Structure formats: C-alpha cells, structure tokens
Image: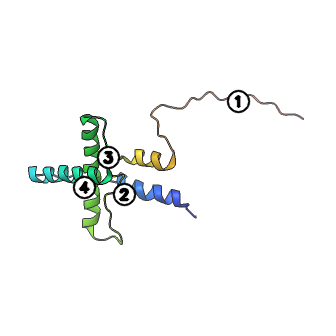
Amino acid sequence: MALTLGKKLIIVMLTILGSWTSQATSRTLQEAASMAERHEQWIAQYDRKYADDGEKESRFKIFKENAEFVEKINSEGNHSYKLSLNAFSDLTTEEFVASRTGYKITNQSRSTNVNTSFSMKT
C-alpha cells in the first residue's frame, strides 16, 4: 500500500508526539529550571510570541512533554534516527496535524440529518 508524503508525515508525527508510554519521574528543581531555560532559548530561536502568561504556561507544558519524549526516544538508542525539537515543539499532535493538513478536530458531534428519501425511475 503506497502512502503519500502527507500521510507518512502525519503517521510519523503522530507516532513521535502521540505515543508517550511513560510519565517522567520526579524532576529536581535544577532540571525544571533547565527545561524552562531551554524553552526560553527555543522561544528566542523561533521568535515565538504568546498572547499572555497563561498561554505561555500552557505552551511550556506542551514543549516540556515533547522535549521529554524526544529525550526518551533518543536515549533508547535502538533507532536509526534521532529526534530533535523544532518550530512545532510547542504544539499538540492535534494542532500540528491541523496546521499541516487543514484537518480540524472538533469535539462536537456532526449532525445526523440525512435526507434518506429518493426515487427510482423504472
């Protein structure tokens, strides 16, 4: 089955960003500060702007989870590739997919109003 480049990209990103298999254990204050510093450096590198402190805090949480996932995969050493942080590192999987494919995930159920009447000519 041939996959298009777009489908391959979605599969890779979903695998990379969506398959966290374990939670990080407790971090020391130094490690937490280090992650905050990494986030600040990342913000400067990619010239990110956040609307307010609340958005920055929520983006930091996503960034931290993605960074921990990257570190976990790279530390396993059984892959032919290495992951790294990039311009999308503060996005959730859903946000990334929507930004790259135009696909919008909604929480609302779709309307089930379907016209089932039809006529057949004989």
Mark 3 to mark 4 CA distance (whole Å): 20 Å
Residue type for callout 4: Glu
Q: Circle 2 sits on which residue?
A: 16
Among numbered discs 3 and 4, the one appearing first in the sequence: 3
Mark 2 to mark 4 CA distance (whole Å): 11 Å
Among numbered discs 1 and 2, the one appearing first in the sequence: 2
Dot 4 falls on a residue whose secondary structure is: helix
Identity of the residue drawn at 29% across and 52% down:
66
Residue type for callout 1: Thr
Residue type for callout 2: Ile
Identity of the residue drawn at 36% across and 46% down:
92
Dot 1 falls on a residue whose secondary structure is: loop
Q: Circle 1 sits on which residue?
A: 116
Figure quadrant of the C terminus: top right
Above or below: residue 90 compared with residue 122: below
Q: Which label number is shown at residue 48? A: 3
Among numbered discs 3 and 2, the one appearing first in the sequence: 2
Among numbered discs 3 and 1, the one appearing first in the sequence: 3
